């Protein structure tokens, strides 16, 4: 992966530049080129690592899916917020990147991403200013979501005097969901307003289906996506008839989080054959994956989608948290030195995967009897069989659920090879 995942000098400089500070999860930066052996205790624990082989696999898997599904891929960068990972995704074939706020637009821009989707409402004067500064330098396109005339008027009033254009994606929503207009009529009204505003350019339709729940979620999502495709075609044709765009311009239809991208792709890809719409999906968690909610969601994708099932590999969890056993205060209970400051706990507690004693030669896989039962700021309570051979100073390797909320707790993340050696670090920009 060295051609995709080059060590960033800026990352090393950032790690070195914080004088008199030792960042968690790092070894001696002067020895990184030789590699930090986790099992030889050359890294300060707890530390967060990403398995290089798993990342490589996941990059290839999702790009193959997108290619087979005839959709473009704009992964949601909020999961990792790592310029190195953004670059790897683009190098693997991604059309662009999605982000969640103005600050993340800056990160994507500096990572060299040409097509950036701000998959959220752009609201507030300072945020306008941040995006305007990027637009003045950017060589590609930036798209923003919008669902109200009030916000669009504020955007237009700010950007028009600067002679800057904003590509607007009208966002469609569902009742009791989150952002997005609720009816096609509201979308059409916004399209008419955009046509009258000098700084605004209607560039497509966007949605997020992940707020649709219940036993009939799959059917309701399919219906919602199909309705949006019909509306997007209508809006695109209206633009062509009114000569407000040219036949070479892309009109986007974009949706899909990390759970329902198969259903979304099945419906929006149909538009490609008519060369009216450009279909873009935005899954984010696939690159890191997990052993919790996204592992379960991916199993449902495999069950539903023959296309996904036919890809001769699967997504693999890449994120590990290594930590020391701090104490064994009573039989059947160990206290591990990681907590809410280090690992996600909103979608399930971390899962112990391996146990290692520094005097051993290799880690051993642990059974389901080993479970994290409680987590505090800096400690996790690990339940183990009372006869378990566990003692202070042992290492535990854990996996997580919901990778976004683990990675945003780490400024630097190690890239770990199959021999438990870190030979690269990446930086996050949350």
Image (tube, rainbow, N blue to C red):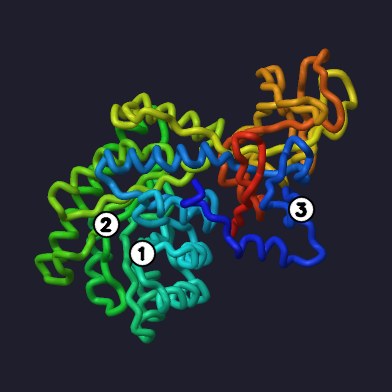
Q: Give the x, y percent position of residue 149.
A: 34, 69
Going 52% across and 38% down the picture, which residue do you hit? 53
Q: Is residue 211 visible?
A: no
Is there a contact, CB below 8 Å, between mark 1 and mark 3? Answer: no
Using the image, determine if residue 425 lies above or below residue 421: below
Is there a contact, CB below 8 Å, between mark 1 and mark 2? Answer: yes
Q: Callout 2: helix, strand or loop? A: strand
Query: Which disc is residue 143 wearing?
Result: 1
Using the image, determine if residue 298 lies above or below residue 261: above
Crowd rating for badge 1 (residues with CA inside 10 Å; few <14, some 14–19, many 20+): many
Q: Earlier in the sequence, mark 1 or mark 2?
A: 1
Q: What residue did someone put label 2 on?
A: 252
Which residue extends farthest left? 241
Which residue extends farthest bottom? 161
Image quarter of residue 298: top left
Q: Give the x, y percent position of residue 57.
A: 46, 37
Using the image, determine if residue 309 lies above or below residue 223: above
Q: Nearer the viewer, residue 54 or 181?
A: 54
**What's the CA distance linking mark 1 and mark 3?**
41 Å
Residue 228 relative to residue 216: left or right = left
Residue 43 relative to residue 420: left or right = right
Q: What residue did someone put label 3 on?
A: 28
Crowd rating for badge 2 (residues with CA inside 10 Å; few <14, some 14–19, many 20+): many
Q: Nearer the viewer, residue 368 or 119?
A: 368
Residue 138 relative to residue 224: left or right = right
Q: Give the x, y percent position of residue 99.
A: 46, 57
Q: Is residue 72 visible?
A: yes
Image quarter of residue 18: bottom right
Q: Callout 3: helix, strand or loop? A: loop
Q: Nearer the viewer, residue 175 or 334?
A: 334
**What's the CA distance linking mark 3 and mark 2?**
47 Å
Q: Give the x, y percent position of residue 111.
A: 48, 63
């Amino acid at each position: 992966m060295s051609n995709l995942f080059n060590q960033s000098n800026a990352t090393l400089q950032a790690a070195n530049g914080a004088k008199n500070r030792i960042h968690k999860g790092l070894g001696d930066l002067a020895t990184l080129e030789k590699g930090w052996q986790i099992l030889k205790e050359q890294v300060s624990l707890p530390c967060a690592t990403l398995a290089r082989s798993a990342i490589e696999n996941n990059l290839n898997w999702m790009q193959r899916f997108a290619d087979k599904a005839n959709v473009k891929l704009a992964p949601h960068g909020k999961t990792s917020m790592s310029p190195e990972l953004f670059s790897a995704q683009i190098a693997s074939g991604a059309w662009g990147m999605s982000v969640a706020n103005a600050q993340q637009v800056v990160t994507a821009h500096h990572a060299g991403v040409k097509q950036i989707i701000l998959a959220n409402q752009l609201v507030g004067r300072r945020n306008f200013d941040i995006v305007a500064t990027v637009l003045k330098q950017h060589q590609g396109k930036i798209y923003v979501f919008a669902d109200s005339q009030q916000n669009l008027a504020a955007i237009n009033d700010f950007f028009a005097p600067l002679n800057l254009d904003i590509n607007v994606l009208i966002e469609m929503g569902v009742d009791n969901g989150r952002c997005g207009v609720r009816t096609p009529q509201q979308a059409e009204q916004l399209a008419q307003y955009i046509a009258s505003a000098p700084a605004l350019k209607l560039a497509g339709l966007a949605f997020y289906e992940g707020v649709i729940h219940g036993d009939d979620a799959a059917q309701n999502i399919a219906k919602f996506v199909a309705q949006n495709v019909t509306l997007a075609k209508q809006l695109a044709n209206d633009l062509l008839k009114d000569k407000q765009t040219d036949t070479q311009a892309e009109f986007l239809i974009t949706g899909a989080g990390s759970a329902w991208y198969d259903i979304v792709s099945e419906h929006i890809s149909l538009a490609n054959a008519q060369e009216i719409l450009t279909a873009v999906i935005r899954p984010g968690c696939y690159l890191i994956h997990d052993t919790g909610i996204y592992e379960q969601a991916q199993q449902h994708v495999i069950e539903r989608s023959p296309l996904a099932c036919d890809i001769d590999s699967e997504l693999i969890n890449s994120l590990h948290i290594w930590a020391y056993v701090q104490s064994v205060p009573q039989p059947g209970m160990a206290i591990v030195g990681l907590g809410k400051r280090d690992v996600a706990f909103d979608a399930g507690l971390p899962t112990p995967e391996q146990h290692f004693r520094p005097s051993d030669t290799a880690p051993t896989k642990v059974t389901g009897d080993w479970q994290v039962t409680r987590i505090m700021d800096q400690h996790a309570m690990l339940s183990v069989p009372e006869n378990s051979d566990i003692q202070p100073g042992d290492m535990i390797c854990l996996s997580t659920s919901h990778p976004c909320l683990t990675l945003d707790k780490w400024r630097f993340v190690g890239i770990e090879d199959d021999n438990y050696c870190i030979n690269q670090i990446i930086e996050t920009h949350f």
